Image (cartoon, rainbow, N blue to C red):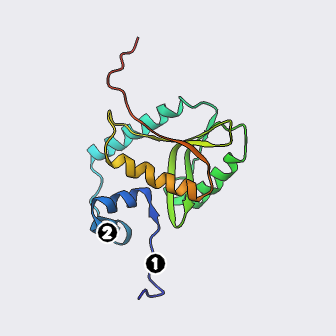
Amino acid sequence: MKKNSEKIAMLSKTRYQAGLQCPLRLWHTCYNREMATEVSRVQQAIFHMGHRVGALATELYPGGIRIEEDHLHHQEAVRSTSVAMGDPNVKAIYEAGFLYNEVRVRVDILQRLKNGKWNLIEVKSSTRVKEEYYADVGIQYYVLKGAGLHIDGVFLMHLNNQYVYD
């Protein structure tokens, strides 16, 4: 039985993926964060590269806006996303925030289509599609559909290591 003082942690895409790897990791991520190891310089560099790849990917979808609120201000990001979706001149939303059924996600690129539907584009800084990416886009699709969006397509964008610059 849950005590009134116990707080239930909200599920996010990151926590969901942690739980797929190890249920105990999910529990620690939600309720015992002080036990987490500090992010190493190598891991921080990987995060930085991922952010750079994500920023470059947005250039393929011009006419969009970035939702600026960080992960600590998810409710505000959801509100900003709703405002952006209401503006027909916004062609894409980068880092769109959504919440459905106590699950929160941020979508790398949400592309507006002319038929009133949207494309969900998940950007990865990998050179190949990995199995865990399917759960990643799956949880996003679940939240977006639950939030009432009409999704036309779900895409995984990754690096092409065969590309040769002219």
| Element on which disc 1 rests | loop
Question: In the current view of this chain or complex, which residue is farthest to the top?
Answer: 166
The relative height of residue 28 versus residue 63 in the rendered view (above or below) is: below
* Residue 93 as seen in the image, left or right of residue 133: right
Image quarter in which the C terminus is found: top left
Q: Residue at x 39, y 34 (%)?
A: 158
Nearest to the observer: residue 41 or residue 32:
32
Nearest to the observer: residue 95 or residue 48:
95
Circle 1 residues within 10 Å: few <14, some 14–19, many ≥20: few
Give the amino acid at mark 2: His
| Element on which disc 2 rests | helix
Return the x and y of residue 65 as percentages of the image width and height.
Answer: 62, 40
Identify the residue position indicated by label 2 in the image.
28
Pick whichever of labels 2 and 1 is earlier in the sequence.
Answer: 1
The relative height of residue 143 versus residue 49 in the rendered view (above or below) is: below
Label 2 vs label 1: CA separation?
14 Å
Give the amino acid at mark 1: Lys
Query: Are dots 2 and 1 in contact, CB under 8 Å?
Result: no
Nearest to the observer: residue 153 or residue 166:
153
Return the x and y of residue 149 as percentages of the image width and height.
Answer: 62, 51
Return the x and y of residue 159 as percentages of the image width and height.
Answer: 37, 30
Identify the residue position indicated by label 1 in the image.
7
